Image (spheres, rainbow, N blue to C red):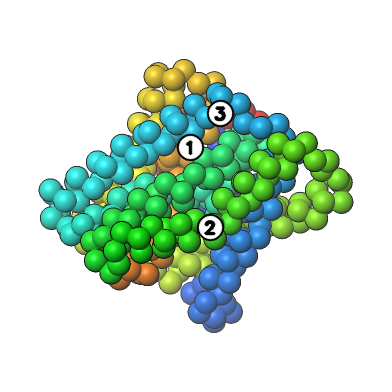
Amino acid sequence: MGDVFLIVGPVFLIMALGFVLGKTRLFPEGSSGILITFVWYVAIPSLMFRSVAPATLPQAEELLFVAGYYSSLLFLYMLAVLVSKYVFRLTASEQAVFALSSCFANGGFIGIPILEGAFGDEGVRLLLVILSFHSLTLLTITTIIAERANRSSGGPGVLRKTIGSLAHNPLLIALVSGLTWSALGLPFPEWLDRVLALPAQSAAPTGLFAAGLAIAGFKIAGDIRQASIAVALKLMVLPILVFTTTHFILGLPTVWVGVATLTAALPTGMVAYTFGEQYGIGARRAATTVVISTSLSLLTLSTLLVLIGTDT
């Protein structure tokens, strides 16, 4: 139990510090956005490239690992769409944001320190493998649904906007660059490793503090019942689906199952709120989902860590 506190405690204490200071005048409005931009476009891509470039190319088993996670994730996405459509009678675009809120994990900010604490560098590496496809799948599907529902553009417009968002995705760029470097067998000099290490090591603490700052500006509003169902899908149903798929169906290694399950149990990422705000669809509900899931994840992640154990 002490090990679990050492893993989870610092993560939520740094977030709490950001939350408390976010309520003061020390950090003006917009501070969280600047920090989040640094983490998303500099720190995490540096961490990903540094992890992928000097390593060997992914093996077939790792592709099976990704398939196991995303088959569960996409099943839950469809389930969330059906729940929001037939239970809550939401519009098509609202269904997409509800499903995104039920699936999109805060892997970049909360996931990295949790997985590093539980499984070391291998845990972070596997998490980055999962996150590489996160935006590629979830944001692509949600964008297509929202664009078509809003009828703001035709088919080519939807496709062009989707491809444009992917082309500017920093994680995807870092992944492709790292895989290319690895495939070509290029040397990875020590000076480059040291340069990338500086922003990479700042990803977790800066991201956690920025997340706390951002949540300080959120208010619980909108339909609490709908947000609570989205939280239940994210923190309870998805981890069960992922564990069942990776452990019982695919029989993957224990560490891989643990990483996938913990990733599934991470709280809703702020991308869901940002997407809702951008499209003017369910932003308050998404913000409430982020706040509630982040608060409850202290308990759910601690419970999972006790159940599945760690490898550090």
Q: What separation in Å lies between label 3 and label 1 (alpha carbons)? A: 17 Å
Q: CA distance from mark 3 to mark 2?
A: 24 Å
Q: Position of residue 122 (x, y in %)?
A: 64, 33
Task: Say which label, 1 or 2, has the lower sequence index.
Answer: 2
Q: Is residue 243 above or below residue 209?
A: above
Residue 70 percent across, percent down from the top left: 41, 36
Which residue is more in the foreground, 165 or 202? 165
Circle 1: residue type: Leu
Q: Amino acid at mark 2?
A: Ala
Residue at mark 3: 62
Residue 115 on image: x %, y %: 58, 40
Q: Is residue 86 left or right of residue 238?
A: left
Q: Quadrant of the C terminus?
A: top right
Residue lying farthest front? Answer: 156
Disc 3, SS: helix
In front: label 3 or label 2? 2
Q: Residue at x 42, y 61 (%)?
A: 160
Q: Report crowding for label 3: few under 14, some 14 to 19, many 20 or more residues within 10 A (C-alpha).
A: some
Which residue type carries mark 3?
Glu
Residue 167 badge = 2
| Residue 262 numbered mark, or none | 1
Q: Which mark is residue 43?
A: none
State the residue at coordinates (48%, 37%). Answer: 262
**In the picture, which quadrant includes the N terminus?**
top right
Residue 158 relative to residue 33: left or right: left
Mark 3 vs mark 1: in front:
3
* Residue 305 x %, y %: 50, 34
Q: Is residue 167 left or right of residue 93?
A: right
| SS under mark 2 | helix
**Cβ atoms at labels 3 and 2 below 8 Å apart:** no
